[in-house]
Image (spheres, rainbow, N blue to C red):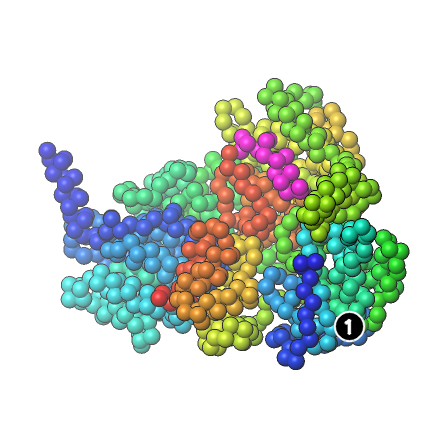
């Protein structure tokens, strides 16, 4: 269970800057026991949002990063062979149901289709989790919530979310924040002054125009925070931008150079 | 000896009179891609492509030495024209490579505002553009300082100029030094200062045309001949042009950068596609197109007649009406195109080359192994049966005290079902009639590719359809279904593939929309739409250039919204920018050597879906 990370409720909420009305929407979904699907590009704050909401609602959070080999028993649990006997070990989903926690499946399309099916009975009005292997039938308490996320721009021809699965969730779209807001976020997260953060956010806006045409992914808020953090720790602006923005975005030397020129045009040669 | 001296003198005086730093030359071909990305990132119109311009005659003042050397008449000036932003093919006006490179970036930055400088107010307009860019991109200020200083060093001395040019040059230098200064100078026709390297210029094609209109008396006959000659020469090179022809102003740019003829013509074609159009009048008008003031070569054949009924393929449906996207109006015009599904006239049974058959056989064998099968997967974390082997290993290890915490002790019968439908849409327009090598044509390669593609996919048990299209205006979009989803892949289909032939034009949007309908009706989870084309969308009417691209792009996006995965395979001569614009950067592949297509097509399918 190395990929689960139960979070302790602390007094200070982890920082999240609201973009629209997502906080209220999420709260009301939780109160009404609706499962939630978060859509949005890489690094726009989906995971941070779930963390923030879990803390705000005072629920424990189980995060599962989905991958191709994720099986149903990774989610539900399995029998382990112990010393002369076998014993049952709950998976993160089962544990979240038992404890009335929030279970967050990150990048859910990465998981195999058959493992996704196990959450179907949890996502309709039954809200149950049958565990075939032990014959147990768990009724999810009202506090339990299932949250999944995926990145619709992700280009793999045959990996998408089944429409029938999609329909089981209330969906919220995330995107990179508005320029002003993004600058605030970068300034706060990386602890740099607002002027620098504004420049970075402006730069990101321009680089995002290249999405699809020249770049597969656009510059995420996360990358901006990385760049700001590097600059704060004394790396020169252009070095930081190269390492944290240009290089991660493309492997094509020409595109990287073009991005560096754009950065120089914004921030100056140093 | 006399000649030798002449050559030496020419080199000496040319070098003396034109400041060029050959060792610091920067070529556009080396920077092109970077500049294109830079252009788009700064806000340049992504529908435009970057291209090279050659030297042009300009009206600027020349120094005594230049006049003596007969040089400095022409200069490559950056400008917009149609769907291109033209940059000089090389820059060598400043002494360091770095500065020349910086100049390329600076010009691209100016262009990213998508403004063509006004032809009568180009100083003011460039001043405005410079201000905008320096305000928006403060990082460029230090660079501009260096560039402007260099440019000022290379301006003529004011005192050396004729009296009437002096105030203009003075004001101009002031603007270069400080784009924010006050400037009221207007440039008349008679006093043109030397071009400024840091600025954009109005399209020289229009300027050339205008100048011609002014001194109308030129030998028009001669010019037309020259124009026709030059226009026909597609390999026209711009490098170090020493051509002294005065009539070649028409060849304003490198023709390689054009894909179709008609893009060069500055025409309003929207009128020609009226609802009650008369095909004959369209054809008539086309013969009368004029380029600048010279007539086009009438030998360019622009229209193609439909064949008589007895030779034509069989029409299956009388016009399925499809919409088309009008990018200027920004609306989807309903019932704009009529598409007919057609059946090919099969005259002879398929006879494939031995080589092709062999290749098909090898690939088919490889694809047979991909047939979905149920198979047991060992060492699973959960499954229907215990995996005795791994349990044995596990028990042994445990008794030795090395048991893993995560033993995989089960076997599972794994269903490898494919939940995928694929539709291949091939462009069968007349451009595929071109020769590839020897006596082989593009269409032959496409034919063999479709055949091998079909063999492979049917061997792998895939669910697929093969179709083709061609068009003649919006009333005749022909759609050939060579193999439907329900058809089995047999000799009938092979004969149909063998019977394909080049036809008319490429109204891609309508064909994609119809293919989208076909594919969307399939009940599989995944739907792959492969589009095989050898060029840009184009048709005889306004469906060309930007219009065709935008319509196709709209159709592709609509397909995506339907849950399809569109992917384009291009066998165009060059991997043009327009592919990324239409299909998105990750959704196309350009195949350089078209001869490899038959082999690559099934492989590509495999890569995309496995």
Residue extending farthest to the front is B400
A121 lies above or below A182: above
Asked whether the viewer can see residue B459, the reply is: yes
Which one is in front, B151 or B4?
A: B151
Q: Residue at horizontal 57%, vertical 49%?
A: B586
Q: Residue at horizontal 29%, vertical 43%?
A: B241
Most prominent secondary structure in the magenta stretch?
helix
Residue extending farthest to the bottom is A11
The percent coordinates of residue B254 (x first, y second) are 39, 45
Which one is in front, B525 or A94?
A: A94
Q: Residue at horizontal 77%, vertical 53%?
A: A82
The C terminus of chain B lies in which quarter of the figure? top right
Q: Say if the magenta span includes residue B76.
A: no
Q: How many marks?
A: 1
Query: Where on the picture, by quarter, is residue A32?
Result: bottom right
The percent coordinates of residue B93 (x first, y second) are 26, 55
Q: Circle 1: is it few (<14), some (14-19), or many (20+) Cα within 10 Å?
A: many
Q: Residue at horizontal 17%, vertical 44%?
A: B11
Q: Secondary structure at mark 1?
A: helix
The percent coordinates of residue A121 (x first, y second) are 84, 59
The N terminus of chain B lies in which quarter of the figure? top left
Question: Is B316 positioned to the left or the right of B134 in the image?
Answer: right
The percent coordinates of residue B216 (x first, y second) are 33, 51
- The residues colored magenta run B594-610
B240 lies above or below A222: above
Q: Chain of mark 1?
A: A
B439 lies above or below B83: above
Question: Is A103 positioned to the left or the right of B192 in the image?
Answer: right
Q: Say if the magenta span includes residue B609.
A: yes
Which one is in front, A26 or B233?
A: A26
């Amino acid at each position: 269970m190395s990929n689960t990370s139960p979070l302790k409720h602390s007094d200070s909420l982890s920082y999240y800057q609201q973009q629209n009305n997502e906080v209220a929407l999420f709260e009301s979904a939780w109160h009404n026991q609706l499962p939630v699907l978060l859509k949005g590009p890489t690094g726009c704050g989906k995971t941070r949002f779930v963390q923030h909401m879990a803390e705000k609602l005072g629920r424990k959070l189980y995060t599962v990063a989905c991958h191709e080999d994720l099986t149903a028993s990774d989610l539900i649990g399995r029998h382990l062979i112990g010393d002369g006997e076998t014993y049952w070990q709950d998976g993160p989903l089962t544990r979240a149901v038992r404890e009335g926690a929030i279970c967050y499946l990150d990048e859910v399309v990465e998981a195999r289709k058959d493992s996704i099916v196990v959450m179907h009975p949890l996502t309709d009005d039954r809200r149950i989790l049958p565990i075939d292997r032990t014959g147990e039938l768990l009724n999810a308490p009202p506090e339990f919530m299932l949250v999944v996320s995926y990145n619709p721009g992700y280009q793999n021809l045959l990996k998408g979310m089944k429409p029938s699965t999609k329909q089981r969730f209330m969906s919220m779209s995330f995107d990179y924040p508005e320029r002003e807001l993004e600058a605030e976020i970068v300034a706060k997260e990386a602890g740099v002054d607002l002027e620098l953060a504004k420049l970075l956010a402006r730069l990101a806006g321009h680089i995002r125009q290249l999405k699809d045409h020249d770049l597969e992914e656009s510059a995420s808020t996360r990358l901006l925070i990385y760049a700001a953090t590097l600059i704060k720790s004394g790396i020169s602006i252009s070095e930081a931008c190269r390492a944290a923005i240009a290089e991660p975005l493309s492997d094509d030397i020409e595109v990287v150079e073009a991005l560096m020129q754009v950065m120089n045009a914004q921030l100056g040669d140093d | 000896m006399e000649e030798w001296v002449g050559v030496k003198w020419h080199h000496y005086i040319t070098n003396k009179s034109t400041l060029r730093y050959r060792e610091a030359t920067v070529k556009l071909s080396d920077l092109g891609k970077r500049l294109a990305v830079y252009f788009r990132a700064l806000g340049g119109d992504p529908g435009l492509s970057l291209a090279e311009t050659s030297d042009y005659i300009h009206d600027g003042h020349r120094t005594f030495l230049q006049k003596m050397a007969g040089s400095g008449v022409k200069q490559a000036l950056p400008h917009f024209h149609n769907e291109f932003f033209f940059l000089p093919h090389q820059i060598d006006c400043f002494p360091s490579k770095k500065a020349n490179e910086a100049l390329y970036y600076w010009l691209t930055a100016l262009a990213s505002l998508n403004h063509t400088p006004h032809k009568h107010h180009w100083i003011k307009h460039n001043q405005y553009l410079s201000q905008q860019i320096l305000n928006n991109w403060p990082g460029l200020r230090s660079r501009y300082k260096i560039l402007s200083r260099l440019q000022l060093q290379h301006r003529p001395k004011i005192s050396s100029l004729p009296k009437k040019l002096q105030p203009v040059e003075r004001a101009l230098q002031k603007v270069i030094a400080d784009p924010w200064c006050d400037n009221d100078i207007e440039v008349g026709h008679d006093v043109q200062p030397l071009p400024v390297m840091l600025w954009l210029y109005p399209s020289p094609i229009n300027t050339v045309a205008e100048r011609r209109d002014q001194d109308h008396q030129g030998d028009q006959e001669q010019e037309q001949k020259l124009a026709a000659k030059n226009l026909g020469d597609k390999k026209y090179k711009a490098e170090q042009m020493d051509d002294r022809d005065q009539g070649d102003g028409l060849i304003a740019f490198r023709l390689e950068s054009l894909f179709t003829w008609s893009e060069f013509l500055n025409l309003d074609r929207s009128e020609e596609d009226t609802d009650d159009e008369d095909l004959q009048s369209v054809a008539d008008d086309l013969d009368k197109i004029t380029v600048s003031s010279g007539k086009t070569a009438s030998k360019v054949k622009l229209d193609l007649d439909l064949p008589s009924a007895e030779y034509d393929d069989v029409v299956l449906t009388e016009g399925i009406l499809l919409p088309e996207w009008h990018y200027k109006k920004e609306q989807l015009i309903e019932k704009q195109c009529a598409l007919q599904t057609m059946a090919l006239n099969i005259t002879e049974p398929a006879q494939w080359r031995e080589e092709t058959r062999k290749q098909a056989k090898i690939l088919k064998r490889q694809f047979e192994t991909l047939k979905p099968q149920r198979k047991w997967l060992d060492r699973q974390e959960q499954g229907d049966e215990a995996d005795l082997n791994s349990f044995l290993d596990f028990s042994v290890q445990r008794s030795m005290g090395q048991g893993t915490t995560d033993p995989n002790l089960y076997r599972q019968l794994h269903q490898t079902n494919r939940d995928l439908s694929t539709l291949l849409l091939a462009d069968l327009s007349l451009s595929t009639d071109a020769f590839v090598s020897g006596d082989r044509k593009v269409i032959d390669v496409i034919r063999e590719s479709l055949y091998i593609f079909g063999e492979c996919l049917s061997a792998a048990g895939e669910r697929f359809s093969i179709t083709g299209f061609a068009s003649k205006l919006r009333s005749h979009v022909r759609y050939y279904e060579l193999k439907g989803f329900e058809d089995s892949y047999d000799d009938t289909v092979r004969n149909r593939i063998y019977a394909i032939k080049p036809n008319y034009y490429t109204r891609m949007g309508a064909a994609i929309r119809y293919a989208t309908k076909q594919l969307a009706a399939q009940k599989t989870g995944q739907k792959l739409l492969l589009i095989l084309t050898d060029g840009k969308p184009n048709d005889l009417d306004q469906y060309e250039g930007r219009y065709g691209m935008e319509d196709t792009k709209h159709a592709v996006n609509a397909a995506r919204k339907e849950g399809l995965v569109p992917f384009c395979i291009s066998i165009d001569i060059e991997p043009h920018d327009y592919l990324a614009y239409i299909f998105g950067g990750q959704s196309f592949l350009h195949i350089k050597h078209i001869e490899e297509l038959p082999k690559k097509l099934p492989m590509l399918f495999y890569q995309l879906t496995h």
